[in-house]
Amino acid sequence: MSALREASAVVLLRTGERGVEIYLAKRSPELRFFGGYWACPGGGLEPVDGSGDEAWFACARRELEEEIALRVEHLGYLGERTTPPFAPVRYKTRFFEAELPLGAEPRIASGELVEGRFFAPAEALASWSRGELWIVPPVLSLLEALLAPSREEFRARWQREEREIDSDLRLPPIRFTPGLFVAALRTATLPPATTTNTILVGHDPLYVVDPATAEESEQQRLFRELDARIATGARIAGVLVTHHHPDHVGAVAETAARYDVPVIAHPLTLERLPRPPQRTRAIEDGAVIELGTAPDGSPRWHLTAYHTPGHDRGHLVFLESRYRALIGGDLASTVSTIVIDPPEGHLATYLASLRRMQELGIGFFYPSHGPSAPHGKRLLASYLAHRAMRETALLDALKDGVKSPAELLPVVYADTDPRLHGLAARSLRAGLEKLVEDGRVCALDAERFELLPAAQGREAEPKP
């Protein structure tokens, strides 16, 4: 779990002809944390802010001046939100409410922001539902709370959500695109990840993708969320499974039994589930799963399943039709690379799956481990480039003569934490197998590999 950083954010409000409006600013696309998203002005605490509770207030005032050239004296404390532990960068953020001073007008003054304006809450939410804006998840909740009939009710709703999250009565509302909800639940997965994302898609019908956690307490958190959705009219229609690995299927049987729904997956996955469910439905590449009406009212909303073997033989991903969000399973991650572990894993097949998904024109990529990536095609390109880099390093290391995997590992994975070398060794083996299949390396035996003369000086493949 990554260390928490501390930050303050300001909910800057004004009241006009359209009622209450909130000021949001678009973060620079170059920023690592929520680059390109609309958010409240704010930033991390610095030594100049002092210490204790007053430091949070001082930070909020300083950030307003630095980012939007606005001086505000009175700040009302609204509450606190913490980035869930699935993210590589995490913040504990305190939110403060401020009224726009009479005659004042915010002005973008920081390179971290590229645009800013006041929105009516319903206007911002409608733009988000049409896919026109990216809005950071806590601000989506703020906007929904601001639909309340009064400021007092707005504060009550926002603070009630905080209490429910803190007491585990509900999951943090992690939403990056309309109609998809990320439940990052603790699993016995591979480091550095500590959680696996269960994705809830749709409302009526609603599908649960990869109910992964095997821990009863985490399962209960998921079930409370699903029960709450049923209470508001949701209809759970099935459990979708990307692949059979243990950190993806820990609650598959329990979820299917509790809600009396089928488990839907590739045949190779269904036959390898640890606890066979009572009802199953096998699907292949190209299967369409109807979702009804999209959040913006668009008809014929659906998922399309794509068979993407390489990491796992039965691996499926699901492309959502309205916003082009790809529920990617272990095709890629935003916290680490993906282990290709022979004989189940096959590197050339995995690279072909990456290239195929790159061609689909995807938007957000929803991995099983880590936050969603808004530029899905760019993420997959980075994975192809990373594999090409590893292949180049492997070929270079073999130029000195016959080598064993044990000799190659510290050279090819010199940038990898030695504690992860056990996992890296499996991917190294997959890389060697690919080069043998390509006719560029000869396997003298199971532990000795030699670069073939024809491969000398050739560039690594694949190209992104």
Image (spheres, rainbow, N blue to C red):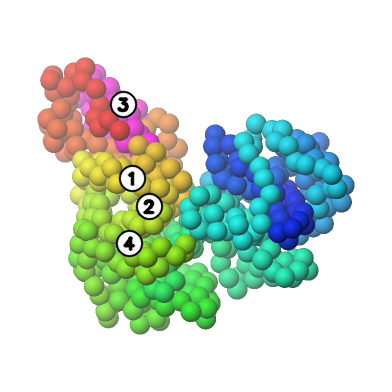
Looking at the image, residue 393 sits to the left or right of residue 38; the answer is left
Identify which amino acid the numbered label 4 is placed on: Leu
Q: Which residue is mark 3?
A: 393
For label 4, the crowd category at 10 Å Cα-Cα, with few meaning under 14, some 14 to 19 and many 20 or more, is many
Where does the magenta region start and end?
382-411
Q: Extreme right residue here?
A: 73
Q: Is residue 334 left or right of residue 136?
A: left
Foreground of the two, 16 or 411: 16
**Badge 4 or badge 2: first in the primary sequence:** 4
Using the numbered discs, state the Cα–Cα distance from disc 3 to disc 1 in whole angstroms.
31 Å
Q: Are marks 2 and 3 in contact (CB under 8 Å)?
A: no
Distance from label 2 to label 3 (Cα)? 35 Å
> Residue tagged by mark 2?
324
To which residue does mark 4 refer? 303
Residue to which mark 1 is pinned: 361
Asked if the residue at tag 2 contacts the one at tag 4, i.e. Cβ–Cβ closer than 8 Å, the answer is no
What's the amino acid at mark 2?
Answer: Arg
The local secondary structure at tag 2 comes to loop
